[in-house]
Amino acid sequence: MMQREALANRLHDYFTRHREDALRRGQQQLADLPDTETIRAIVDAAFWSSLRREEGYVPKISLAFVSAEQVTSPIVLDRPLALSPEALARVSPAVERPGIHLGVWRDCGDLCVWGMTRNVPILCFVLEVAAPGLLVVKHHSGDETRKFVNVAALEGDQIKMIDERAPGPACWIQSVNPMVKLAVSMRAHGRGGLLLVVPSNTEAWRESIVHPMPYAVSAPYGGMAPLSEPVVTAVAGLTAVDGAVVLSDRYELLGFGAKIVRRKGWPQVEQVMTTEPVEGAVPVLVHPEQLGGTRHLSAAQFIQDQRDAVALVASQDGRFTIFEWSQKEQMVQAHRLDALLL
């Protein structure tokens, strides 16, 4: 309980600060700011609902602190639902699809669920149940290219506040940035996957791949650019096949089902530096096997051998890691991005 109270205070500070910044920038039609008691009540209800089962299924819901008057075309219930784990679990099958939020507001002083909405105002407090005991706090950014911003993740008694000042991996900010949706889609199929992004001006990456590649493309397929929604879905589907998908930095599909092998004459990778863009996190040196299974070890080895490439790994449990070579540290870096992608 104390952990969630601390989270409520930190979240209230975050939303207060960002609201003041938005007002100074002249932004209008901002969402109302929830107080700490409201935040704590929403977190508690969502947390306990995540541990329930509705006809054998885990409730997956999104709660938005917003009134029906602040959104367009809402579905308003004739009788509001109590903000309780039981009520949330019962209604969850109707709202588990992405983009549907249960609207939470006060009625006669009590918090309740008034209905459903597909749109929310800028800086609206949104809490998603991602898995049993795993909650993610988000808000609408007002930027349609990046609709929601993750603020914090609560997993059991662990609180991870996103570090807004974290520089982030260079590969994510630059060449991999257009593939954020691809990363999310890779996680979504639940089978795990590995994607290698290789430079288009060299064939050296082939020295780290077993030949023949099971599903090599006869000529580089350039239909991947731009990464539209159908293309993202198609490429993410390929990562479900055993082996790695190989994509050039020009978004040309080179093949999939690739098996990674240590480059001849290069050493075995022994350590990687892990980072995570959350407050209080510090880089840690670990053996790549500590990050996951064969995919993580293969990705780390590939990056050690091919230092101008990038590897994206999705675990079956939904965790996501980007591997890149650090010129400064002269070693492989593993950026854990779970909290950003939930």
Image (cartoon, rainbow, N blue to C red):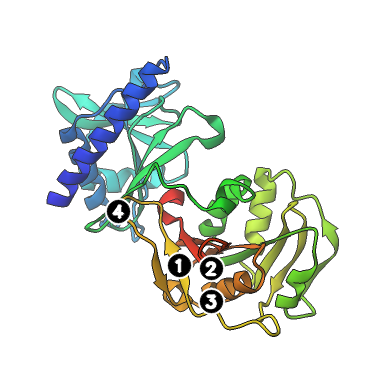
- Residue at horizontal 41 percent and vertical 71 percent from the top: 285
Q: What kind of element bears circle 2? A: strand
Residue 36 drawn at (x, y percent): 18, 34
The disc, 1 or 4, on the residue closer to the chain's N-terminal end is: 1
Say the numbered circle drawn on residue 297: 3
Label 1 Cα crowd, 10 Å radius (few <14 / some 14-19 / many 20+): many
The disc, 2 or 4, on the residue closer to the chain's N-terminal end is: 4
Residue 331 drawn at (x, y percent): 53, 69
Question: Would you say the residues marked 3 and 4 are in contact, meaning their CB atoms lie under 8 Å apart?
Answer: no
> Relative to 79, does residue 47 appear above or below in the rendering?
below
Comparing 262 with 46, the one in front is: 262
Could you say which quadrant of the image residue 79 lies in?
A: top left
Question: Would you say the residues marked 1 and 2 are in contact, meaning their CB atoms lie under 8 Å apart?
Answer: yes
Label 4 Cα crowd, 10 Å radius (few <14 / some 14-19 / many 20+): few
Say the numbered circle drawn on residue 280: 4
Q: What kind of element bears circle 1? A: strand
Q: Which residue is mark 1?
A: 273
Q: What kind of element bears circle 4? A: loop
Q: Give the amino acid at mark 2.
A: Val
Q: Give the amino acid at mark 1.
A: Met
Which residue is situated farthest in the front direction here? 328
Give the label, 3 or 4, closer to the camera.
4
The disc, 1 or 2, on the residue closer to the chain's N-terminal end is: 1
Residue 147 left/right relative to 283? right
Question: Would you say the residues marked 2 and 3 are in contact, meaning their CB atoms lie under 8 Å apart?
Answer: no
Residue 174 drawn at (x, y percent): 61, 47
Which residue is situated farthest in the right direction here? 219
The disc, 3 or 4, on the residue closer to the chain's N-terminal end is: 4
Could you say which quadrant of the image residue 141 lies in?
A: top left
